[in-house]
Image (cartoon, helix red, strand yellow):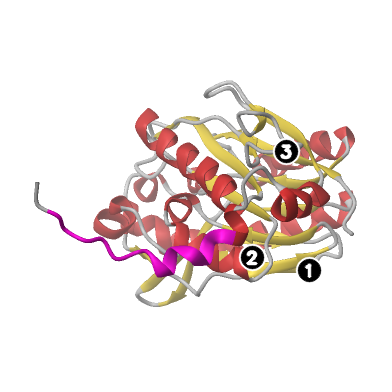
Amino acid sequence: MTASFVAAVAQYPVSRPGSWEQAATTLAQWVAEAAAYGARLLVFPEYASMSMAALLEPTMQDDLRLQLPALQALRTRYLDLHRELAREHRVYLLAGSFPWQLDAQRYVNRAWLCAPSGRAAFQDKQIMTRFEREHWGVTAGEPAKVFDTALGRIGVAICYDAEFPLLVRAQIAAGATALLVPSCTDALAGYHRVRVAAQARALESQCHVLLAPLVGVAPWSPAVDVNIGAAAVYGPPDRGFPDDGVLAQGELNTPGWVYAAIDPSMVESVRADGQVLNHLHWAEQDERRTALVETL
């Protein structure tokens, strides 16, 4: 049985670094702080990488289409930095997602999960928002995965993906007991959509869900100009968990780490003998999902 551990979810502020060294130092300080607290799993937000666009030429900073190919020159250093920090601090670290180029015309929203060994594997976003589809040209990537780790089996649902229960359910069916939800939303309503979805996924799959939002403003960036959210860790509102399912939650739009103790055995327990058995009873929907029309 996997032992309990501390998780850290970031309310990570968008910034405008003046150099690669400054950006790397900031990230290293954040990771060192969480590791010193005792966290073994660290989650950064969707598109936290877009602060790196400040390192591009000014004309590129203003142009969504020019940013994507220009950022590719930084992606190896970006990934290597997270791998090195994970190895140095002996933590699992979900890097802020990056608009990753696959070929001349295709970019995906990719989040890398880095292990204490220095190894890394990625999860691509599955369903794109209107902004990604209509304005940015970022497209869906490889199918959903789950990651076997020393902390248990982990899934990643990038922001909008968390709002689609069948996507997440495939990860749960593959054995995930924790779901990481890095997010980037530019309106309070958007934050609440992701928050409600995260809590719903925790309820219906009886698992831990860790939400990490980008926060702050960057008027110079057309991609991440306004960012709203609060980090949180959710579980099912059931035996052994808080009555509202909220294990920890940050203050809206305030940069910093939010910490929570994660006990995977609680997921096993509530799935086996909870007040309700949503996880076990999921398949019963298939027998009843045709709605009849009745006239009154």
Instruction: From this view, report whether residue 3 is shown above or below residue 259.
Output: below
What residue is pinned by disc 2? Answer: 76
Task: Pinpoint residue 191: horizontal percent, then vertical percent.
Answer: 44, 35
Q: Would you say the residues marked 1 and 3 are in contact, meaning their CB atoms lie under 8 Å apart?
A: no
Q: Residue at x 58, y 22 (%)?
A: 254
Q: Which residues are magenta?
A: 281-294
Amino acid under label 3?
Answer: Arg
Q: Please name whichever residue, 63 or 261, is drawn nearer the observer in this view of the structure.
A: 261
What residue is pinned by disc 3? Answer: 239
Q: Nearer the viewer, mark 2 or mark 1?
A: 1
Left or right of residue 57, residue 205 in this image: right
The image quarter containing residue 97 is: bottom right
Q: Residue at x 63, y 36 (%)?
A: 237
SS type, badge 3: loop
Q: Residues within 10 Å of mark 1 (few under 14, many from 20)?
A: some
What residue is pinned by disc 1? Answer: 119
Res. 74 in view: no
Task: Pinpoint residue 96: horizontal percent, then vertical percent.
Answer: 59, 50
Q: Residues within 10 Å of mark 2 (few under 14, many from 20)?
A: few
The image quarter containing residue 153 is: bottom right
SS type, badge 1: loop
Q: Which residue sits furthest bottom?
A: 103
Instruction: From this view, report whether residue 155 is shown above or below residue 131.
Output: below
Amino acid under label 2?
Answer: Thr
Instruction: From this view, report whether residue 88 is shown above or below residue 170.
Output: above
Q: Residues within 10 Å of mark 3 (few under 14, many from 20)?
A: some
The image quarter containing residue 263 is: top right
